[in-house]
Amino acid sequence: MTPAELEVAELTAELIRVDSSNYGDGSGPGERAAAEVVMARLAEVGVEAHYSESAPGRGNVVTRIEGTDPSLPALLVHGHLDVVPANAADWSVDPFAGEVRDGYIWGRGAVDMKDMDAMMLAVLRQMVREGRRPRRDLVFAWVADEEAGGVYGAKYLTANHRDLFDGVTESISEVGGYSLEVDPSLRLYLIETAQKGLAWMRLVADGTAGHGSMLNADNAVTEMAKAVARLGGHEWPITLTPTVRRFLTEVSEAFGLPFDPEDPGPVLDRLGPLVRFVGATLHHTTNPTMLGAGYKANVIPGQASAVVDGRFLPGYEDDFFKTVDELLGPNVRREFVQHDIALETTFDGALVEAMIAALKAEDPTARAVPYCMSGGTDNKTFFADLGVRGFGFVPLRLPKDMDFAAMFHGVDERVPVESLQFGVRVLDRLLLNY
Ligand SMILES: [Zn+2]
């Protein structure tokens, strides 16, 4: 085994043992202790890193390995150091113990995304120790706050330390690169090339306040209830973006199914639990999540409000808002709680070829397919602003029966040690040869 394969599991466990829960309100422990682990492991091999805090305890680590060919643009490899909280009572192990059991490393962050944080470290350490240099500059970033929007991590870094990313044109990071076994001779690896956009909308209806016993044709609660029902109940038509069309075509082919763009159901069925990653990428969604109005049973309030979590497809933002406004009607206005762009890149070019080659070298049954994710990552929120073309690529060859989608933010989050070892082999090839 290579040095990276030998140490990647322990590095993952070491990072899991540092509780870096992000509650989203600044009350958590922060990422400093996790960043210190990263910096200590870098220092062991003589690598210096930039460290900065966006707020007390909110640590970010960035380092650059110089390539042999300065004419090539740099590649960014980034991971977030924070994790979502874990309620220990629900778990069968201590979520912050980094326990190794049955060939898995268990704990919060095992797949989201201390696994990749550790893979990045292991591959970088191996590269430096062996005196090998990549062709292009590699920028490694371990950042804070992804789970709460990246304000103290990627946003802070790109706004205040932009020079760290000089010359970067492409990036790889979380939520892609994992396998779906079709049969023993074919494994699909899903590489994320697109992300839906986000529109968290606060809806407001104004009406005429008054006594609950009297006639009222201008009741804000009634207006809001109707608008929320229209939006929540709307059946958004299937709209296949180039990424989703290619994904469904490739998956149908792999499973030997005909692909009907009007009825992708049979293809989706074959994805098993992974359907959770892609099921919502065939159309826009609008899910009402909050409601508010009134303070007393016999008082009609003058205003009612609601919050709707809207997600729109890349390339169809205008279409989304046009329909939303039609559904809301003239009596309900909307404002943004949060609004993020959608992203989509093509599945081609030298980096894509290099990812495919690295996968195939380690798994001859590998076939890479692009997919769109329904959520977002730091790739979208901030690095896209720098003009960086981002991909989701954390290479993991997974056991056939593993419910990988359930691991993200899930109870008993865990990752197979063998998957991590596969991951560092692929990553090492990619980062060195690209
Ligand atoms: Zn994540």
Image (tube, rainbow, N blue to C red):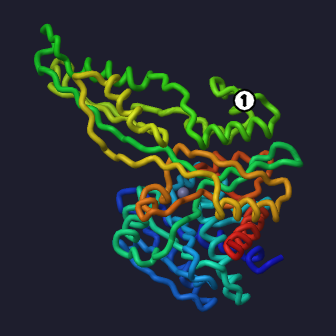
* Residue placed under numbered mark 1 in the picture: 259
Amino acid tagged 1? Phe
Residue 16 lies in what quarter of the image? bottom right
Residue ID at (38%, 20%): 230
Q: Is residue 234 left or right of residue 92?
A: left
Q: Quadrant of ligand 1?
A: bottom right
Q: Is residue 97 left or right of residue 159?
A: right
Decide if residue 413 is in sight here: no
Q: Nearer the viewer, residue 242 or 145?
A: 242
Query: Is 399 placed above or below 151 here?
Result: above
Query: Considering the image in quadrants, where does the C terminus appear?
Result: bottom right
Query: Considering the image in quadrants, where does the N terminus appear?
Result: bottom right
x and y percentages locating residue 215 in the rendered image: 14, 8
Query: Is 246 placed above or below 113 here?
Result: above
* Residue found at the far front of this picture: 71
Residue ID at (18%, 28%): 303
* Residue found at the far right of this picture: 185
Decide if residue 43 is in sight here: yes
Q: Could you say whether the residue bearing mark 1 is in a helix, strand or loop?
A: loop
Residue ID at (41%, 61%): 385
